[in-house]
Image (tube, rainbow, N blue to C red):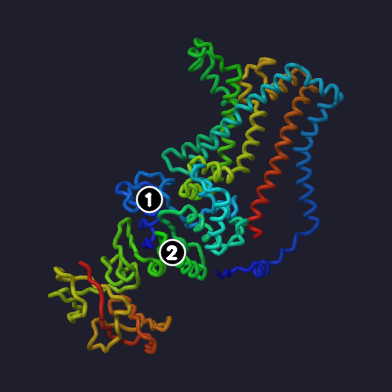
Amino acid sequence: MLGLLGPSGSGKTTLLRIIAGLDAPDRGRILFGGDDATGLPVQQRAVGFVFQHYALFKHMSVADNIAYGLNARRRADRPAKAEIKRRVGDLLDLIRLSGFGDRYPSQLSGGQRQRVALARALAVEPRVLLLDEPFGALDAQVRKDLRRWLREIHDRTGQTTIFVTHDQDEALELSDRVAVLDRGRLEQVGTPDEVQENPVSATVLKFLGDSVEVEAMAEGGRVSVRGRETPVSAPPGVIGPVKLYVRPWQLQLVELEAAHLSGTVRSSYRSQGRQRIEVEEAGGQILAVEDFDGVRYAAGHPVGLRINGGYVFG
Amino acid sequence: MSEIFSPVRLAEARPAPVAGEGAGVRALLIGVAITFLALFLVLPLAAVFVQALSHGVGAYLNAFREPDALSAIRLTLTVAAIAVPFNLVFGVAASWAIAKFEFPGKTFLITLIDLPFSVSPVVSGLIYVLLFGSQGLFGGWLQAHNIQILFALPGIVLATIFVTFPFVARELIPLMQEQGSSEEEAALTLGASGFHAFLTVTLPNIRWGLLYSVLLCNARAMGEFGAVSVVSGHIRGLTNTMPLHVEILYNEYNFVAAFAVASLLAALALVTLVVKSVLEWRFSDELAAGRKH
């Protein structure tokens, strides 16, 4: 299960449509398990595509929607009527809509429509399942349930799946591997852990979560901020002024004497057992710090910050 | 899967209907509307039938026994039978192209489709005289090859097609644009050929709009006067359509026959109106089904 992650306009959906054969690439090839599919028309690619807004056939019942791909086959390849019916029944069970075969898409909720769209795509036994922002149009609770359910289905069927999302949490939770795209370029591919721990570029880092940008110096393989050394090591060959990117949890509130950075507390609030403190530097830059719950600071209180980790890119 | 919406709660949230205006105002408004309709629509229509039947049913029916009248009816039906299917095919093809694809000159094509609506029908007829008349652009060539377009069936069909050009396309373009092409794309990814997708997905989605537009197109094709009048040549029993025949009879002070043939056209209009209303009723019924659940 591969998640295509990127900001809007980064080319995720375009890439997905090219894989499906709905759009043509300017150059490059599309390989399915080693077979070149670049020249194949969309009908012969054997992909299951789930559209962002489902694109269910409004005038057909749920069962007819799911059976569409099977009925569209040439007579020689088409399963018998009874077989189609059995397959549709199985898929309805899989998407937990067993009694809904005779309903029409307009009679279903958003989450139910999404599941029907998925069953319709699975019915043709695709080589690869392609999902375009599968949960984009759903509200938060339904979204969460569907996510877990999709992962379950994936684990059970082993279906190769590529999905598009702009939501980091969704990509990191669902995918075995994440591909981060930016402005039409593939920035990094790796497991969710890899891309989070070792982002290859500032773009990937910034997209995967909050970070603070700090002016720093690289010297002798070490990075120092305001003349004080940090635990961050510089990439080989990088010497001179660099940008250091620090996650909120890599900053620690300390006494001013031991600090890399300093400023005054602007605001602080609690969220999910953590204290989140925003510190305003003298230059006006806002730094976000995360600390364990328990400390309390009033606005305007001067604080020092120590950098416990961070990222420098060559 | 938890669903948050409950229809009961939604119904409760709906505001109470606003109190209506006074009964007097309502009666006045309805009265004005009905008087207007009666004066400008029902009265003329009734007059046609009254005039047609003023000398009894026998005289009325006699008007249709005349060979010239019969030939006019036959010609009108023939013209509609050619022009309407042509416009149906063109209209669907054009709306498909405009709604589902991006290509240079798209806006120009939409403007072009509208042209027949903005040009006077007389001009539409004259275009064909300029093209195919004996002094026209292709006149010499046509004469040399002994092909008759003007003052014959081909000319009348061409003029009718030109005038009724926009009906199907104008109705379908917004409909198809609104529906987008994701359903067709879904059908293609499921292995359907383009034609199969058209038959099973596109056509069912536009069927009522299509029927509606064909109906209007047909009504116009049978009733067109101006453009056809220019290219027909008014040869009795040969190139007179029903509207032209009505004019000739009227000019000859043969009022009963004129109004008798006119009543056929009026009847056609009424049938169109009824079918159109039924279609609109079906439309809204389908739409309501989506909202009810």
Q: Secondary structure at mark 1?
A: helix
Residue lying furthest right in this view? B56
Vertical placement of A91 versus B207: above or below? below
Circle 2 packing at 10 Å, graded few (<14), some (14-19), many (20+), is: some
Label 1, label 2: how many angstroms apart (C-alpha)?
Answer: 23 Å
Question: Residue type at mark 2?
Answer: His
Q: Which residue is mark 1?
A: A18
Which of disc 2 and disc 1 is earlier in sequence?
1
Q: Is residue A271 visible?
A: yes
Vertical placement of B100 versus A130: above or below? above
Q: Nearer the viewer, residue A246 or A174?
A: A174
Vertical placement of A8 versus A169: above or below? above
Q: Nearer the viewer, residue A155 or A204?
A: A155
Q: Nearer the viewer, residue A95 or B48?
A: A95
Query: Residue B33 — which label?
Result: none
* Residue A306 % position (x, y): 26, 83
Please, which chain is the residue tagged with disc 1 on? Answer: A
Circle 1 packing at 10 Å, graded few (<14), some (14-19), many (20+), is: some
Circles 1, 2 touching at the beta carbon (< 8 Å): no
Q: Which of the image's four quarters has the N terminus of chain B?
A: bottom right
Vertical placement of B167 versus B137: above or below? below
Please, which chain is the residue tagged with disc 2 on? Answer: A
In this view, the mark in front (1 or 2): 2
Residue lying furthest left in this view? A220
Residue at screen point 25% across, 88% down: A256
Q: Secondary structure at mark 2?
A: helix
Q: Which residue is mark 2?
A: A154
